[in-house]
Amino acid sequence: MFRTLTLTTALVGAALPAAAFTHTGEEVDPAVFEGREILPDPWIDDCDVERSLVPIEGKENLYRHTNPFPSTHSGLVLIQDEGALVIDAGNHCAAEWLRDEIRERFDVDITLAILKHAHFDHLAGSVVYAEAGAEIIAQENAIEPIIGEKMPVAEPTITFDEEMTVTFGDYEVLLHHEPAGNHSNSMIQVWIPALSAMQCTDVCQSQTVPYMDFLDFYYPGWIETLDWVIEKDPGVIEVGHYTPATTEDQIALRDYMTELYDQVIALHREGQPWDQLWRNVDAAEPYRDDWFGYELMRFANIQGMFRWVDNHRRGLW
């Protein structure tokens, strides 16, 4: 079922131009957030950070916003006459800057924001979008941690389960959630077919070793997600950190992760204790010279994969 939302001055309390889009999601009952406790934003005063909003080469109307706090965070921005669609924030002051930069350069407001997963480092500052009158989309599993962790972030107004389509201006935008999880159980991949562009934050990598010990990790769903991304073969993949990536980067990442899993589970089945096992895992060795983070992340990656295998392998008992 498609719904049409029209944001007017009566709704947002400011002189904004009307903006309409259609979607196949479900509107959230605001009552679910009533009375929730909200913690202070620990980064709200971290404003001395560089920001940027740059066009993506060869992708009309598509931009990339970045800020380097607490590490490089980035997301896609789609500009239309109807307004701007923005993915993630990452920092309150950076979100304020982005809101104002979009208004100044394009004479439109942020009318739709997509919160890709319920990790605070990507959602921080998203209240700026809500206060500007934007509708907020998240996967339905994001609501529980937003409430339970008392996150000072925008409250979703639209959610979905596995698939959702947004028609925003001239573009159809597909939102995809892998039900088996990947990097959280609330992750969204955002696919814009007409531009061959995708946002695949944290799951996809740009010639980097995955972060630390696979925080909030679901191995089978991670591989399923990479298969889905590879099948789409995007021309550009925004990974939420560092630099944009390619499909070839995701093929290499899938090869690395499956080899890491295969090595860890084989050694575990041999009965090797942890202190012996990790020394015999060399899945990252082919990427030592080409991928960022080898020295910092390699050992932690083995730890995370060992934890997954150890928690899920049962054997003959």
Image: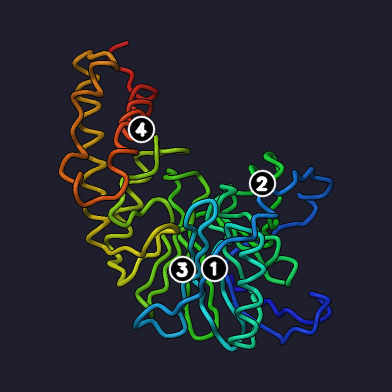
Of the numbered discs 1 and 3, the one sitting upstream in the chain is 1
Q: Which residue is mark 2?
A: 146
Of the numbered discs 1 and 2, the one sitting upstream in the chain is 1
Report, in whole angstroms, how far the alpha carbon at label 3 lies from the one at label 4: 33 Å
Q: What quarter of the picture does the C terminus occupy?
A: top left
Q: Which residue is mark 4?
A: 300
On the image, the x and y values in percent for residue 70 come to 54, 51
Of the numbered discs 3 and 2, the one sitting upstream in the chain is 2
The label nearer to you, 4 versus 1, is 1
Left/right of residue 254 with respect to residue 138 in the rendered view: left
On the image, the x and y values in percent for residue 12 come to 79, 75
SS type, badge 4: helix
Kindly indicate whether the residue at mark 2 contacts the one at mark 4 (C-beta within 8 angstroms): no
The label nearer to you, 4 versus 2, is 4
Picture residue at 46% right of the left edge, 72% below the top: 64
Q: Please name the amino acid that badge 2 sits on.
A: Ile
Rendered position, 307 above or below 290: above
Of the numbered discs in the image, which one, if any, rests on residue 174?
Answer: 3
Rendered position, 237 above or below 302: below
Front position in the image: 68 or 252: 68
| Most distant residue in the front direction | 48
The label nearer to you, 3 versus 2, is 2
Rendered position, 123 above or below 3: above
Q: Which residue is mark 1?
A: 51
Report, in whole angstroms, how far the alpha carbon at label 1 lies from the one at label 3: 27 Å
Report, in whole angstroms, how far the alpha carbon at label 4 lies from the one at label 1: 30 Å
Picture residue at 75% right of the left edge, 67% below the top: 131
Decide: few, some or many residues near mark 2? Use Cα within 10 Å; few <14, some 14-19, many ≥20.
Answer: many
Decide: few, some or many residues near mark 1? Use Cα within 10 Å; few <14, some 14-19, many ≥20.
Answer: many
